[in-house]
Image (cartoon, grey):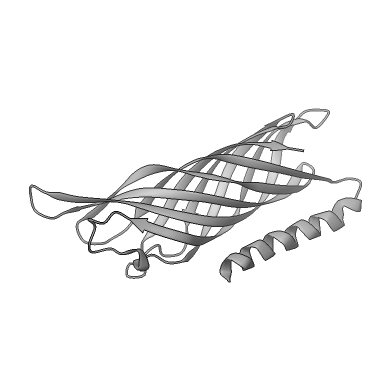
């Protein structure tokens, strides 16, 4: 049900942009993107440390505006991290966590540089992101944290930089979790960096 809600948010944003296309001073762009992410979990669980791991994401976007613009995306992806807990002074228990998600970031942006023909630019963006978890998988040897201990959804702040070169897009962003990652740890959160290569038309 929550996944349908995320798609509904994206559809509403897309419809709003299409209605606003009649404004001659603004432009509407569509695109797709894909890339990699690096996640690191923060947690205060006893004797637990975390390690960053690579993940992936891919999706679609809509951008509306000129020098100042709004951009919304919908992405399917997977983030991954490693949890390490010392069982004894000589032994550590390690587990990898894989989380498949759908995310909807909504951002405002500003083009710091833009070419005269408008085909190339360098931009900054910031906004908020809603994420719905589709699946959580843990290694079998990490017995004191189970997949049901993870929250099924989260909200994050997102900020990044990007560039357009004709029809090619490059984006680098940081996603900072505002809501708990684990049900039994209110201070737990996910911090993720992402890099995407995409197209815009």
Out of 84 and 147, give the one closest to the viewer.
Answer: 147
Closer-to-camera residue (181/107)? 181
Above or below: residue 116 compared with residue 198: above
**The C terminus - image quarter:** top right
Judge left or right: residue 158 versus residue 78: right
Q: Is residue 186 visible?
A: no
Residue appearing at x 91%, y 52% in the figure: 22
Q: Residue drawn at (36%, 61%), measured in percent from left and top?
A: 188
The quadrant where residue 120 appears: top right
- Asked whether, in this view, residue 77 is left or right of residue 70, the answer is left
Q: Quadrant of residue 142?
A: bottom left
Residue at x 45% of width, y 64% of height: 179
62 vs 130: above or below: above
Taking 25 as reference, is 68 left or right?
Answer: left
Q: Position of residue 99 (x, y in %)?
A: 43, 55
* Residue that lies at the very extreme toward the front in this rendered image: 140
Residue lying at 38% horizontally and 65% vertically, measured from the top left: 150
Number of on-image labels? 0
Task: Tell me where residue 77 appears, x and y as whole percent.
Answer: 52, 49
Image location of residue 129, percent across then percent down:
57, 57
Rendering coords of residue 187 (x, y %): 36, 64
Instruction: Depth check: give the residue in front, 73 or 160.
Output: 73
Say whether residue 144 is left or right of residue 2. left
Residue sticking out furthest to the left: 89
In depth, the one of 68 and 174 nearer the eye is: 174
Residue 148 visible somewhere in the drawing = yes
Quarter that holds the N terminus: bottom right
Residue 67 versus residue 89 in the image, above or below: above
């Amino acid at each position: 049900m929550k996944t349908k809600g995320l798609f509904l948010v994206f559809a509403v944003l897309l419809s709003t942009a299409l209605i606003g296309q009649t404004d001659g001073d603004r432009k509407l762009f569509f695109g797709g993107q894909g890339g990699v992410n690096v996640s690191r979990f923060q947690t205060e669980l006893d004797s637990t440390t975390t390690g960053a791991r690579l993940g992936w994401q891919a999706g679609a976007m809509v951008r509306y505006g000129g020098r100042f613009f709004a951009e919304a995306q919908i992405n399917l992806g997977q983030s991954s991290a490693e949890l390490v807990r010392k069982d004894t002074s000589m032994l550590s228990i390690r587990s990898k966590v894989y989380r498949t998600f759908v995310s909807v970031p909504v951002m405002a942006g500003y083009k710091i540089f833009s070419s005269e023909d408008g085909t190339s630019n360098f931009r900054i963006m910031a906004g908020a992101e809603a994420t719905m978890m589709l699946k959580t998988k843990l290694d079998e040897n990490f017995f004191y944290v189970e997949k049901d201990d993870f929250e099924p959804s989260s909200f994050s702040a997102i900020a990044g930089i990007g560039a357009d070169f004709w029809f090619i897009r490059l984006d680098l962003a940081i996603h900072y979790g505002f809501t708990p990652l684990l049900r039994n740890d209110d201070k737990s959160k996910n911090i993720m960096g992402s890099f995407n290569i995409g197209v815009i038309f």
